[in-house]
Structure formats: structure tokens, C-alpha cells
Image (cartoon, rainbow, N blue to C red):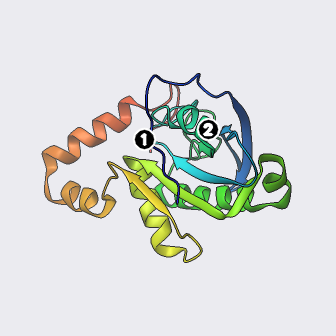
């Protein structure tokens, strides 16, 4: 179980190491916050809310690393510095690729990963995607959702409420990278 109780003042933020792995033919990029302490170390793969942050998710990587937890954050394909086109299906594939990367013997050795204590988590969009991924992959034993989006409800609401759908579409268009074409 990954759990932490934080007392007193905030610790010095942990530095991160830029990482990348392949998913869907493109490079997915993120940050790895190396947990301090003795081997082996529990590891949390943390998926951001949409569109995410290229540095951390809610500051949790920097907060948890000093508390003996490795944290891998990444931006799904098509968001921030990650290559490709963003889709929900692509994000699920990116989570699978992150798990494959973290389970590699070279990664486990470099970051002292305890392969028996890997959790998947996320915030908002990422929380919903973490739950959806965990529901389909029986190897995932631990999942954390922070204000996770229920993507099924979200889609049903878009289909039944044209005003809600128009607002969401406008938000998505406004977040599009400059010069990108409309799909």
C-alpha cells in the first residue's frame, strides 16, 4: 500500500528526472521523482488531469518522493511535450506502456522499484483513465483516483445535453495547439 501522513512544514521539493518511453509509435515524455530511502521503493504511476502539466501532478511527485515513494508522471500522447494525437484509447495504451517501462529490469534497478508495489493513479481525467485501465488489467493491484472523471457519464451527458456538449467542444478547441488543424 502506498500511504503517507504528512506532518509539520513542507519538505524541500524533490528533483525530478526527465523520462520518455514509446507508445503508439511516439515518444511519451514525463518526469520521474525518485523516492528516497532504502530499497525497494513503492512506485506510483500518476496520470494528470486534462491537458495536464509537464512537470508534476498536483505537486504529488515532489511531495511523495521524500516520503519513500517513487512517482512517475507523464503526459499522454498529443499533450504538452508528448508526441502523437490525443485520444482516450491512446491514453489507456500510454498507461500500459508506462507500466511496461517501469517493470523493465533496467528501470527497476536504476530507480529501486519494488515490482510488487506499483500503483496507478491520476487526477480528474487521469483518475478516470487510471480506473478504466485498472478495470481491464488484472495485473494492477492498486489504483488511486483523485476527483476522477467518470468518462461514461461524461459522454452520455454530452449526447443528451447540447448546451453542455457545445461548452465542452469550445473548451477543447480553445486548448488546441496554435496552428493545429480542427478534427
Number of residues whose C-alpha sits closer than 10 Å to that of mark 1, classed few (under 14), some (14–19) or many (20 or more) = some
Residue for point 79% across, 55% down: 108
Q: Reply above or below: 81 against 160.
A: above
Determine whether the residue tagged by mark 2 lies in a helix, strand or loop: helix
Residue for point 19% across, 57% down: 157
Residue for point 58% across, 51% down: 44
Disc nearest the viewer among 1 and 2: 2
Instruction: Give the numbered dot on residue 100.
Output: none
Work out whether residue 50 or residue 48 is closer to the camera in this orientation and state it: 48
Disc 1 to disc 2, how far (Cα)? 23 Å
Q: Quadrant of the C terminus?
A: top left
Work out whether residue 177 or residue 91 is closer to the camera in this orientation and state it: 91
Q: Are marks 1 and 2 in contact (CB under 8 Å)?
A: no
Residue for point 59% across, 74% down: 139
Determine whether the residue tagged by mark 1 lies in a helix, strand or loop: loop
Which residue is denoted by mark 1 in the rendering?
Answer: 50
Left or right placement of residue 25 versus residue 145 in this view: right
Q: Reply above or below: 8 against 87.
A: above
Residue 23 rendering spot, x and y as whole percentages? 68, 55
Number of residues whose C-alpha sits closer than 10 Å to that of mark 2, classed few (under 14), some (14–19) or many (20 or more) = many
Residue 45 rendering spot, x and y as whole percentages? 58, 51
Left or right placement of residue 45 versus residue 29 in this view: left
Left or right placement of residue 174 versus residue 51 in this view: left
Which residue is denoted by mark 2 in the rendering?
Answer: 65
Q: Locate residue 13: give its quadrant.
A: top right
Specify which label sits upstream in the sequence, 1 or 2.
Answer: 1
Left or right placement of residue 72 versus residue 133 in this view: right
Residue 67 rendering spot, x and y as whole percentages? 58, 40
Residue 28 rendering spot, x and y as whole percentages? 67, 45
Amino acid at each position: 500500500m502506498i500511504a503517507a501522513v504528512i506532518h509539520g512544514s513542507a519538505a524541500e521539493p524533490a528533483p525530478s528526472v526527465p523520462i520518455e518511453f514509446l507508445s503508439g509509435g511516439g515518444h511519451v515524455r514525463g518526469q520521474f521523482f525518485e523516492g528516497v530511502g532504502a530499497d525497494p521503493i513503492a512506485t506510483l504511476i500518476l496520470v494528470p488531469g486534462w491537458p495536464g502539466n509537464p512537470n508534476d501532478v498536483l505537486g504529488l511527485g515532489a511531495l511523495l518522493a521524500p516520503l519513500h515513494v517513487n512517482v512517475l508522471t507523464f503526459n499522454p500522447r498529443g499533450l504538452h511535450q508528448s508526441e502523437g494525437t490525443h485520444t482516450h484509447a491512446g491514453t489507456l495504451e500510454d498507461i500500459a506502456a508506462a507500466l511496461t517501462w517501469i517493470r523493465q529490469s533496467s528501470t527497476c534497478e536504476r530507480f529501486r522499484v519494488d515490482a510488487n508495489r506499483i500503483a496507478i493513479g491520476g487526477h480528474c481525467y487521469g483518475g478516470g483513465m487510471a480506473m478504466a485501465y485498472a478495470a481491464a488489467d488484472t495485473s494492477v493491484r492498486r489504483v488511486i483516483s483523485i476527483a476522477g472523471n467518470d468518462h461514461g457519464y461524461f459522454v452520455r451527458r454530452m449526447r443528451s445535453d447540447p448546451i453542455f456538449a457545445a461548452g465542452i467542444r469550445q473548451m477543447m478547441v480553445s486548448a488546441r495547439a496554435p496552428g493545429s488543424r480542427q478534427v
